[in-house]
Image: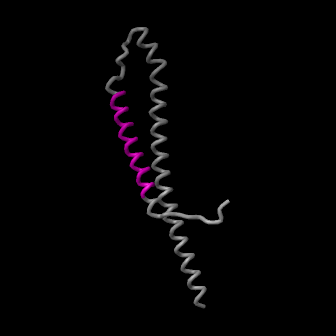
């Protein structure tokens, strides 16, 4: 196990931004999916086959979209925590270094 922790604050910020951008792209794809699903809502018809399809399709499709929304929210949350955690760790390191320098001057 390593006895050192290293952090590149600028890289953490860059990577958290990339993660956030990936979440944005996922959001756009999810919006496209929603629009496409809405556009084709009920296209399976009202006959017995169409009703049977709707009965097996609609609820799972809705759940898939809801779960995808939850995943997108998780990506946004992870990006924010990564960004904040990187800032906090960097600030803690700077504060600790200042205390060490100050202790040596006493």
Residue at 50% across, 56% down: 82
Residue at 44% across, 50% down: 19
Above or below for 105 versus 26: below
Residue 15 screen position, x and y as percent: 44, 54
Say which quarter of the image contains residue 101: bottom right
Quarter that holds the C terminus: bottom right
Residue 16 lies in the magenta-colored region: yes
Above or below for 101 versus 17: below
Residue at 60% across, 85% down: 103
Q: How many marks?
A: 0
* Residue closest to the far left: 39
Range drawn in magenta: 14-37
Residue 44 screen position, x and y as percent: 37, 15
Chief secondary structure of the magenta portion: helix
Above or below for 34 versus 6: above
Residue at 49% across, 18% down: 56
* Residue closest to the far top: 48
């Amino acid at each position: 196990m390593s006895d050192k922790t290293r952090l590149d604050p600028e890289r953490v910020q860059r990577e958290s931004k990339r993660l956030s951008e990936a979440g944005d792209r996922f959001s756009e794809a999810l919006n496209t999916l929603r629009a496409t699903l809405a556009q084709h809502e009920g296209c399976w018809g009202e006959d017995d086959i169409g009703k049977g399809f709707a009965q097996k399709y609609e609820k799972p499709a809705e759940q898939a979209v809801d779960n995808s929304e939850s995943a997108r929210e998780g990506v946004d949350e992870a990006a924010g925590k990564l960004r904040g955690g990187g800032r906090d760790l960097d600030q803690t390191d700077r504060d600790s270094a200042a205390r060490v320098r100050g202790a040596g001057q006493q």
